[in-house]
Image: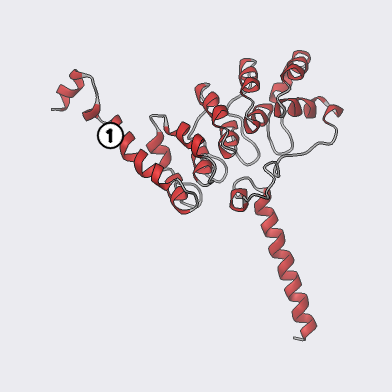
Amino acid sequence: MSDSEDENQAVRSFEEIHEEINKYKRNPETSGMFVSGWDDADQDVEVVKDPKANPIDYVLWAAENGEICILRELLKKQPGLVHAQDNDGYTPLHRAAYSNHTDVISYLLSIGANINTKTQLGWTALHSASNWNNYVAAARLLAAGADPGALSDGGQTPMHLAAAISHCKSTLLILFLRDDTVDIAHKTNNAQETPEQLAQRHGIYGPLFEMMTPAVSYIKSISFTCNPYLRQKSI
């Protein structure tokens, strides 16, 4: 093989690697691997130049930007738009969740938004809130019955996402305030990693899991109960 052929092979290899990296960046399941001070938090959000051009784009834009008056007007005329989805499967509820607009979330839920709707990659609105550390939005969704154990196509729970990113402490603490915390902390994704393992390997919150898991397990145990009848049964 000549020097020129070697050079062409190197160029092709670089282009393939570059394309593979971009593919992972476009995928919310793996985009957290590339988070830095220079990353745009909206890099995976579908951008529409003229959202007013059609009702679906407009209702999604209004939810994302917290324009609740516009949202009310649009949904009063076309109630079915509450279930609108973009090309990636994001609904107005997803958009409100990753933008942390709790007033919009409450309104959408009040008119029938489906809290369990998933995107093309299997994300619920709670996944969206958790990935961006929107802990107030996450708390609102949990209060409305969002499933913290919901799995994306990659087998990721919202806790997996929060555990792997260094800025999601507040969301993790919200997710910890549940009876099923220990079970979810030990759930494996498609790569056979639990949220606890991700926190220890990729994030900085390993110690939080080390404190939380045994504490919650003990609080849930029969020995911790304040009910004297249950205590007597356990003797």
Q: Disc 1 marks which amino acid?
A: Tyr
Residue at the spot 76% in from the left edge and 78% down from the top edge: 7
Q: In the displayed image of the protein, which residue is found farthest to the left?
A: 235
Q: In the displayed image of the protein, which residue is found farthest to the bottom?
A: 2
Q: Quadrant of the C terminus?
A: top left
Residue 230 in picture, x, y percent from top left: 20, 22
The secondary structure type at the circle numbered 1 is helix
Relative depth, front residue between 149 and 36: 36
Residue at the spot 70% in from the left edge and 41% down from the top edge: 42
Colour setting: secondary structure
Residue 184 in picture, x, y percent from top left: 43, 38
Residue 96 in picture, x, y percent from top left: 66, 28
Q: Give the vertical position of 64 relative to 195 (above or below).
A: above
User: Which quadrant of the structure image shows residue 105?
Assistant: top right
Residue at the spot 74% in from the left edge and 80% down from the top edge: 6
Q: Give the vertical position of 50 relative to 8 (above or below).
A: above
User: Which quadrant of the structure image shows residue 126?
Assistant: top right
Please tell me how crowded label 1 is: few (under 14), some (14-19), or many (20+) other residues with Cα within 10 Å: few
Residue at the spot 40% in from the left edge and 32% down from the top edge: 180
Which residue lies under the disc numbered 1? Answer: 218
Q: Give the vertical position of 4 relative to 223 (above or below).
A: below
- Relative side of 183 to 146, left or right: left
Q: In the displayed image of the protein, which residue is found farthest to the front?
A: 37
Residue 14 in picture, x, y percent from top left: 72, 68
Instruction: Please tell me how many numbered marks the rendered image carries.
Output: 1
Q: Quadrant of the N terminus?
A: bottom right
